[in-house]
Amino acid sequence: MSSKPIIVSGIQPTGNLHVGNYLGAVKNWVELQNSDKYEMYIFIADLHSLAGNMTAKERHEQIIRTSAELIASGIDPDKTTLFVQSHVAEHTELAWIFNTVTPISELERMTQFKDKSQQQLKNINTGLFTYPILQAADILLYGGQMVPVGQDQIQHVELTRDIAKKFNKKYSKYFPETKHLLTKIPKVMSLLEPEKKMSKSLGEGHVIELADEPNVIEKKLKKAVTASGGGEGAPGVENLLLLLKQFSSGDSYKDFEKAEKAGTIRYGDLKSEVGNAVAEYFAEFREKRNELMMNHDELAEILIAGADKANPVASKTMEEVRKLVGIR
Ligand code: ADP
Ligand code: TRP
């Protein structure tokens, strides 16, 4: 067994990756992976996505697409155990055990549950409520010590730590106390409602997808909200400046920052500069993604190989946990 610290993170197969996912999580995963300092588990949280509104067909396609996009972003299946959550049955078994140590009141505090319930008023299912318990199982099954995620997931990682503590107190000190790991950009804002987090669930025009072609990026940015009332520090403008800083290869963001302070900034110019920078940054990604998408069999093989690596680890944890709780 490796003695490197263990990192676990996941993403739902609910839509194409967008620049919020990338700057808040995926870019960090790739950097952590390439540092060779950690043992990494990255998975596609298909079971979590069942609590949402996608059709079975959409979900099936999206699992393949998400895996292609993660690999095109730089996740290397030789370095990272990349797999699909439902391919490892122990996630749900451990989640059940964690159900029995998690107070309902803890789940009621979760802001993602409150938000998602508002977004899908006709489908407030129990899975949406117990979602963070499955997430704790995802992490602790592999002894995850660090979880790189965006800001919106901090609460779930804190709950994971509480669940581990409760289990350790009730049975035996077994699980580590997991910490979250943020990037420098834990929250990218929506293009159309820059006071809200950029999220797939807000709709197409709110996000820039990594796979968007240059003309699509340009069109979306044209509609992006800037400083409707005028004035320095408007969230829409700050967000565009942030994107420019992250994705441009040069220093042009400095000129735009200066112009913003001086009140001479031209939003049209800023938008086209951001558009060019994003389109160029992800040019290689788009090419790689399209190549991978032409070969579903190869992707399926990668995911099976990932599950083959994850399964023995998960099965060992569950054997030990079953003994600790007295069911084996
Ligand atoms: P979405 O909200 O678009 O459905 P997910 O919930 O699938 O995105 O998020 C996957 C990962 O990306 C999580 O680690 C999450 O914290 C991060 N993330 C999502 N949106 C953003 C954002 N706008 N800014 C920073 N990180 C984000
Ligand atoms: N809840 C996470 C999200 O919405 C996805 C996720 C599921 C996850 N299980 C996880 C993230 C375990 C980190 C660790 O983005």
Image (cartoon, rainbow, N blue to C red):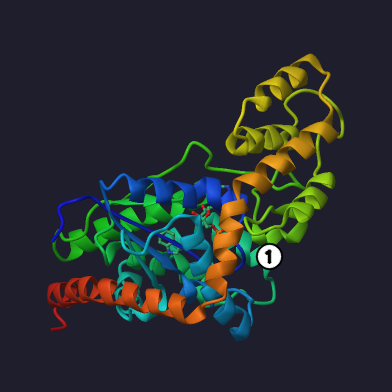
Above-or-below relation of 143 to 89: above
| Element type where label 1 sits in the image | helix
Query: Relative to residue 114, is residue 213 drawn left or right?
Result: right
Residue 130: give x, y in percent of width and height.
46, 70
Q: Quadrant of ligand 2?
A: bottom left
Query: Relative to residue 5, is residue 243 drawn left or right?
Result: right
| Quadrant position of residue 77 | bottom left
Q: Which residue is at 74% across, 52% downward?
A: 214
Residue 203: give x, y in percent of width and height.
73, 61
Query: Residue lying farthest top?
Result: 262
Total marks shown come to: 1
Q: Which residue is at 44% across, 42% downward?
A: 182
The answer to whether residue 168 is seen in the rendering is: yes
| Quadrant position of residue 314 | bottom left
Q: Amino acid at mark 1?
A: Gln
Q: Which residue is the site of mark 1?
A: 119
